[in-house]
Image (spheres, rainbow, N blue to C red):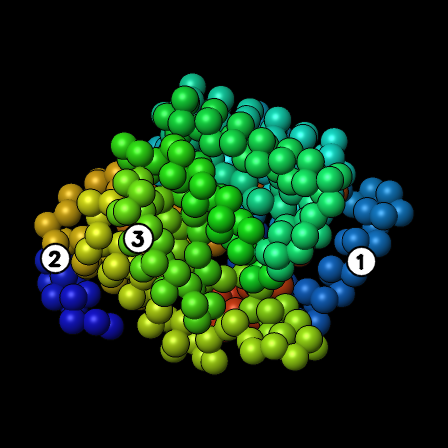
Amino acid sequence: MTSSTTAATTMGLPDLQDTATAFAHQSNGDLRRAYWLFRMVGNPAISKVGKVLSQMALFLHLPVKGLIKGTIFRQFCGGETIAESLHKAEELRRSGIGTILDHSVEGQDEEDELDATVTEVLRTIQVARERGDIPFCVFKPTGVSRTELLMDMSAGKVLGPAEQAEWQRVEDRMDRLCQAAVEARVPLLIDAEESWLQPAIDRLVEHMMARYNGERAWIFHTIQLYRHDRLTYLRALHERAGTAHFHIGMKLVRGAYMEKERERAAEQGYPSPIHPNKEAVDKDYDAAIAFCVANRDRVRMMAGTHNERSCLYLAGLMDDEGIDRSDERFWFAQLLGMSDHISYNLAAAGYRVAKYVPYGPVREVLPYLIRRAEENTSVAGQTGRELALIRKERLRRAAR
């Protein structure tokens, strides 16, 4: 832990191990269900078999939707529609936590499907405009563009007339979303993608920030700090923003495609864009936090992380710098169903916190749910932490 975090701890940083606060919103039955769910997804063999069986069952239209919806879907998703998800938003609001409605339907490349994604994200913006508990909206660039087109643009491929027209439609979709968000006064998060898609996304998002972030940051970019070039990118972006007179919205994440990135680099014979070890990733992540705090006159940030030390590092920096814990320039965010000990304890201490609340039809959200299960299996200690905290709270309640 850094000296800043240590110093701030004496000033009253939240205790992230306070399970009474972390799980106050959950009944004994909720905790029991979550405990057994994490036990299952934490077992690699069971998780792998469950992945295959669930995909096969839905493909064959077997009656398993209710089982999925009552278990893993219930843990990690708000509902199948926006309306179904609003009860979760209300529950989070009561604990001082905002909701980020995340339409988690993936793998769609047809023009009508891309247009439908835009329509759905516009609905989330409208709902956020009408409510006070949805502080951000979000979308993935692959939700508004064909994946191969992003790859071609990122590689600098010369486009033919049809592809140029297609790219113009991508720009128009993104501009429509950004304009709607600014008019609704709802900040809009744009997610990061794989490194071979990201250059085109970087250029497009920077263009939107230059267009819409003149007075304050409404449009947020995302950088994945498992890449060894992203801290340098953040610093260069700050210089460009100063020259062009726009503000930066930035979500900091560690990253979601590490194994895929390394495998592709090895297969195609180019240097891996990924840091060699976790220590280097952690160092860059915390350096990016410090950079955003130091440049808060032009940068508004969200720490999208399940890492306790990084959350306490940002909280400590804010306290050390005399930044009000409710300052809207600084947010923490975690996924629904994970790391409640971080989200609820930070919110109870007065920091701004939001939960990503994925939603969509069970069949179409299944790829997202499988990734959550795989993440809990592969991320060192993630499932163990969840289980240990749930076990601690169950024992505390039993002893009352």
Vertical order, 76 against 119 (above or below): below
Q: Is residue 305 visible?
A: no
Which residue sits furthest right?
A: 60
Q: Is residue 250 visible?
A: yes
Mark 1 is on which residue type?
Answer: Leu
The local secondary structure at tag 3 comes to helix
Numbered circle sitting on residue 188? none
Mark 2 or 1, which is nearer the eye? 2
Q: Residue drawn at (70%, 77%), measured in percent from left and top?
A: 267
Mark 3 vs 2, N-terminal side: 3
Disc 2 on helix, strand or loop?
Answer: helix
In the picture, measured across the screen, residue 373 lies left or right of residue 159, that is left
Three-letter amino acid code at the position of disc 3: His
Q: Which residue is mark 3?
A: 238
Determine the residue positioned at 72% across, 66% down.
Answer: 48
Disc 3 to disc 2: CB gap under 8 Å: no
Identity of the residue drawn at 73% across and 35% down: 111
Residue 373 placement: quadrant = bottom right
Report helix, strand or loop for mark 1.
helix
Mark 2–mark 1 distance (CA, rounded to whole Å): 51 Å
The CA span between labels 3 and 2 is 23 Å
Q: What residue is pinned by disc 2?
A: 320
Asked if residue 285 lies left or right of residue 41, the reply is left
- The residue that label 1 is drawn on is 53
Front-most of residues 113 and 160 = 160
Identity, as a three-letter code, of the amino acid under mark 2: Asp
Q: Position of residue 195 (x, y in %)?
A: 56, 62
User: Relative to 260, does residue 221 appear above or below in the rendering?
Assistant: above
Residue farthest top in this picture:
130
Q: Is residue 22 positioned above or below 41 on the image?
A: above
Specify few, some or many for label 1: CA neighbours under 10 Å numbering under 14, 14-19, or 20 or more: few
